[in-house]
Each structure stands twice: as structure tokens, then as C-alpha cells.
Image (cartoon, grey):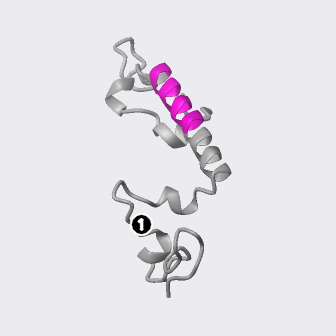
């Protein structure tokens, strides 16, 4: 059922138990929540695309990694042990090193 669905890689075919039917087809059915999952995933995809586009227009690189306290969160570079590009730079772009 789900093999040809464009959202299969996202939802994974839904929860296996939600696919069972007592009509002899067993689990060879879409999830009973398939339409709801599609609506939710499409909504999230549209919202994320709009937010990413807005952040890109606003130059959101550092803003996207800034927490509520204003302290930068570690990005992938910091997690990998490298110094992130935004480290050592003041808000106005001047070096703080």
C-alpha cells in the first residue's frame, strides 16, 4: 500500500497496528490515520519551508542557533569539535578575538 506514497520515508507507513482490518486483508492496508498523517506532514513541510525562507531573507544563520537567553547554541561544527564560523564574532560582525 505505502510503497508508492510520496510520504512513506517520513511516516514509515504508520504504526503497524493501525493498518489491521478484520476483512481478511490483515495488515495489507494503509493506516487508519493515513489522511491525517498526510495533512499533518504537509502542514509541517509548508511551515518549515516558509520559516527557512524567512530566516534566509533575514540572514538567519546565527539567529537560527540563538536560544532564548541570547547565548549561541552549539552548531554541527562545534559538536564535531571545530570552532563554528560564528564564534568570536560580535553582533556587528567585528572580531571579538
When asked about the image quadrant of residue 16, the answer is: top left
Q: Position of residue 71 (x, y in %)?
A: 37, 65
Verify whether residue 42 appears in magenta. yes
Q: Residue at x 46, y 40 (%)?
A: 12
Q: Position of residue 46 (x, y in %)?
A: 59, 34
Q: Residue at x 38, y 57 (%)?
A: 67
User: Magenta region: which residues?
Assistant: 35-47
Left or right relative to 54: residue 13: left
Left or right relative to 20: residue 52: right
In the foreground, 49 or 37: 49
| In the rendered image, the vertical position of residue 3 relative to residue 68, given as above or below | above
In the foreground, 13 or 82: 82
- How many numbered marks are there? 1
Q: Secondary structure at mark 1?
A: loop
Q: Residue at x 41, y 66 (%)?
A: 72
Q: Which residue is mark 1?
A: 72
Amino acid at each position: 500500500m505505502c510503497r508508492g506514497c510520496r510520504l512513506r520515508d517520513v511516516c514509515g507507513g504508520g504504526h503497524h497496528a493501525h493498518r489491521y482490518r478484520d476483512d481478511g486483508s490483515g495488515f495489507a492496508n494503509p493506516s487508519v490515520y493515513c489522511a491525517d498523517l498526510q495533512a499533518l506532514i504537509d502542514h509541517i513541510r509548508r511551515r518549515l519551508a516558509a520559516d527557512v525562507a524567512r530566516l534566509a531573507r533575514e540572514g538567519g544563520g546565527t539567529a537560527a542557533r540563538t536560544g532564548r537567553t541570547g547565548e549561541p547554541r552549539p552548531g554541527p561544527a562545534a559538536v564535531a569539535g571545530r570552532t563554528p564560523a560564528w564564534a568570536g564574532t560580535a553582533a556587528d560582525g567585528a572580531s571579538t578575538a
